[in-house]
Image (cartoon, rainbow, N blue to C red):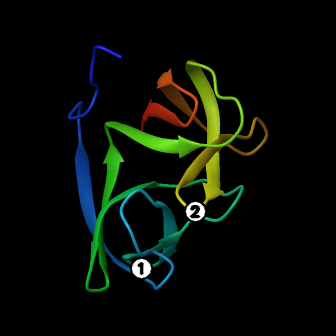
Amino acid sequence: MNVDFKGYLDKVITFECDSTVTQSGTAVKMAGNGTVSAATDGEAFIGVAADVRDGFATVQTTGAVEMKKSGTIAVGFQKLVSGGSGIVKVNTTSGKEYIVLSVDDNTATFIL
């Protein structure tokens, strides 16, 4: 692809995180006051961990992100959920709607 969407309206928030958030690229959900945990398979997420260190996660909550994908995801408005383990997938019943900008065999780029 000849264009890159990174940097578009990127905003991050620093949260405490539990032991389920171990690496960047993890879709996260709220776990408590000011705390996030990894979103498991089928769960909605508030953002994607951009960095994880010493019990804290910097979570990107807006802007374009690229994640590994499971199944078929089309460009345009799609309802997405965590697929667990840093993966995103479509779920038309419980997913949150995002704008998917591009997809390939392994990844999807979308706006949070």
Looking at the image, residue 15 lies above or below residue 13: below
**Residue type at numbered disc 2:** Ser
* Quadrant, the C terminus: top left
Query: Is disc 2 placed on a helix, strand or loop?
Result: loop
Lateral position of residue 27 relative to residue 58, left or right: right
In-front residue for pair 80/83: 83
In-front residue for pair 74/45: 74
**Residue type at numbered disc 1:** Asn
Residue sitting farthest toward the front:
105
Q: Residue 39 sits in which quadrant?
A: bottom right
Q: Do the residues labelled 2 and 1 touch (CB within 8 Å)?
A: no
Q: Position of residue 6 (x, y in %)?
A: 25, 33
Looking at the image, residue 104 lies above or below residue 22: above
Query: Is disc 1 placed on a helix, strand or loop?
Result: loop
Looking at the image, residue 96 lies above or below residue 111: below
Foreground mark, 2 or 1?
A: 2
Looking at the image, residue 112 lies above or below residue 22: above
Lateral position of residue 65 relative to residue 19, left or right: left
Lateral position of residue 99 relative to residue 13, left or right: right
Q: Position of residue 56 (x, y in %)?
A: 29, 78
Residue at image mark 1: 33
The residue shown at (51%, 36%) is: 107
Disc sitting over residue 3 in the figure = none
Q: Position of residue 88 (x, y in %)?
A: 59, 46
Lateral position of residue 37 relative to residue 59, left or right: right
The residue shown at (33%, 42%) is: 62
* Quadrant, the N terminus: top left
Q: Where is residue 90 in the image (x, y as percent from the top left)?
A: 69, 37
Residue at image mark 2: 85
